[in-house]
Amino acid sequence: MTAPEESYSDALMAAFRHARRWLGSQEERRVGPRLTAAELAPAFGGPLPQDGTPAADVVEYLAERAEPGLMAMPSGRFFGWVIGGTLPAALAADWLVSAWDQNTGLRFATPATAAIEEAAGRWLLELLGLPQEAGAGFTTGATMANFTGLAAARWRLMTDAGWDLDADGLAGGPRIRCFVGEERHDTIDLGLRYLGLGRPTAVPVDRQGRIDPAGLDRALAGTGRGESGGSGHAPLLVCLQAGNLHSGAFDPFREAIAVAKSHGAWVHVDGAFGLWAAAVPELAALTSGMDGADSWGTDAHKTLNVPYDCGIVVVRDALALRAAMGVHTSYLIQEADGPADPFETVPELSRRARGVPVWAALKSLGRDGVADQVRGLVLHARRLAERLAELDGVEVLNDVSYTQVSLAFGDDSTTRAVTARIIADGRVWMSGSRWQDRDILRISVSNWSTDDADTAVAVDAVRDALAAVRG
Ligand SMILES: *Cc1c(COP(=O)(O)O)cnc(C)c1O
């Protein structure tokens, strides 16, 4: 028998060596993978082996065979979708989380990780200017953070309408009407679908994708508030957005929230990557009034740059969050009146302590460091847009107020060809998408390590691809 620490050390040392090699390769390597999933399949597939393999050998095998199929998402030259890298303190903390292996559901059972997550939650409320009395939970991402915020909304709206949701379910109860901007993220619809709330009404947006407050007012008025008969007004739910995927734009919170509140609606904000603008004093205009909402969902794995997977939900009405997510079973021992147990604020019962890397990221950066990081992303996005706009044949389609830049190169087929060329070239990676009836090339600056050299490479890559497509 080997001692436990020895059986771990060989495997961990192998993982450490490979992790360093991978991270060390980011500066130079081609961004895209060299093999497809189908090409990689034989290395990992075949029949399940009859006999086992020593742990360190498993790690060696895995790391070597996976390498050609890895996308350099931690690279400063990766600009695809909206995907952050990983800060050193957050990555190392994440390794500790795995080694600690704390099932972070109950404060009394895993006090260290519960205390760390509570501290991280309080720091976030302070950093993002959200109400101090709010409840917070660490989810797998913004999809689940939004889902959780919307679940709290559903519970509160139904309860206030006099309907016992927990006992009777949705059927036969008052219908919650949901309103979103035309350019909300698709995962908002997904969250509403998970909750049985159906398809939302889409409210018109402006050229940057921001919701039109007057249009929202008309849409809410059209629900015939009061029709639910006697037991108060029709329950209304409005989802706003901090950070449009294509333009980076923020909904006009002050006006839109005032409109929503005049109709008695619950307001949820999807701020997957945009909520972090609230940490930067010069960007205050973008998030002004956002603290008047009822719930907020964001990601830590995007703008903050912690490892996957980590999102955060914040709900002003902490009781509603706990009521919507808590498991009211007696075999789980809880402190009677204390703060919520971690499992009472997220969909999962058993989970890793994913808030610990958030704490580590915030501790390593400090308030000023978070602001500098977000500021840097915006600065690089603006510089990229300025330099790309100078190139003949490049159109910058959005006002670059945050981290996103959307480009077109004349007609759709040219834009698609340039996008394909950039990806094949491999110096940078950017996503093709469709926005306002046009094919576009979208750049997201979300990685803490992106610097001037990376953006210079990006400009060269776009210029060369366009030249090649034009022949
Ligand atoms: C990424 C994103 C989401 C979904 O977040 P996940 O972390 O992928 O679950 C939701 N809304 C917006 C605006 C996003 O950018």
Image (tube, rainbow, N blue to C red):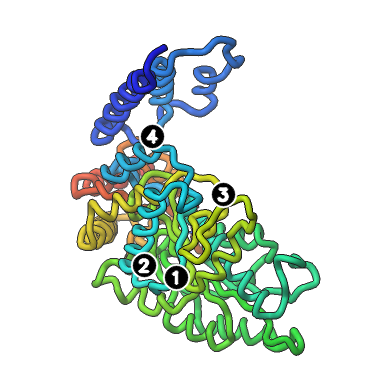
- The three-letter code of the residue at mark 4 reads Ala
- The three-letter code of the residue at mark 1 reads Ala
Going from the N terminus, do you reach mark 4 or mark 2 first? 4
| SS label for mark 1 | loop
Marks 1 and 2 in Cβ contact (< 8 Å): yes
Going from the N terminus, do you reach mark 1 or mark 4 first? 4
Q: Is residue 418 above or below residue 386?
A: above
| SS label for mark 4 | helix
- The three-letter code of the residue at mark 3 reads Leu
**Which residue is tagged 1?**
134
Q: Residue at x 45, y 55 (%)?
A: 138
Q: Nearer the viewer, mark 4 or mark 2?
A: 4
Marks 1 and 4 in Cβ contact (< 8 Å): no
Q: Is residue 318 above or below residue 61?
A: below
Residue 110 seen anywhere in this rendered image of the structure: yes
Going from the N terminus, do you reach mark 1 or mark 3 first? 1
Q: Where residue 439 appears, x then y in whole percent?
A: 48, 54
Q: Between marks 1 and 3, how big is the CA–CA gap?
A: 21 Å
Going from the N terminus, do you reach mark 3 or mark 2 first? 2
- The three-letter code of the residue at mark 2 reads Leu
Q: Residue at x 31, y 49 (%)?
A: 447
| SS label for mark 2 | helix
Instruction: Depth check: give the residue in front, 381 or 415.
Output: 381
Does residue 183 appear to the left or right of 298 in the view shown? Answer: right
**Which residue is tagged 2?**
125
Instruction: Depth check: give the residue in front, 388 or 316.
Output: 316
Marks 3 and 2 in Cβ contact (< 8 Å): no
Q: Between marks 3 and 4, how big is the CA–CA gap?
A: 20 Å
Q: Residue at x 49, y 62 (%)?
A: 340
Q: Between marks 1 and 4, how big is the CA–CA gap?
A: 31 Å
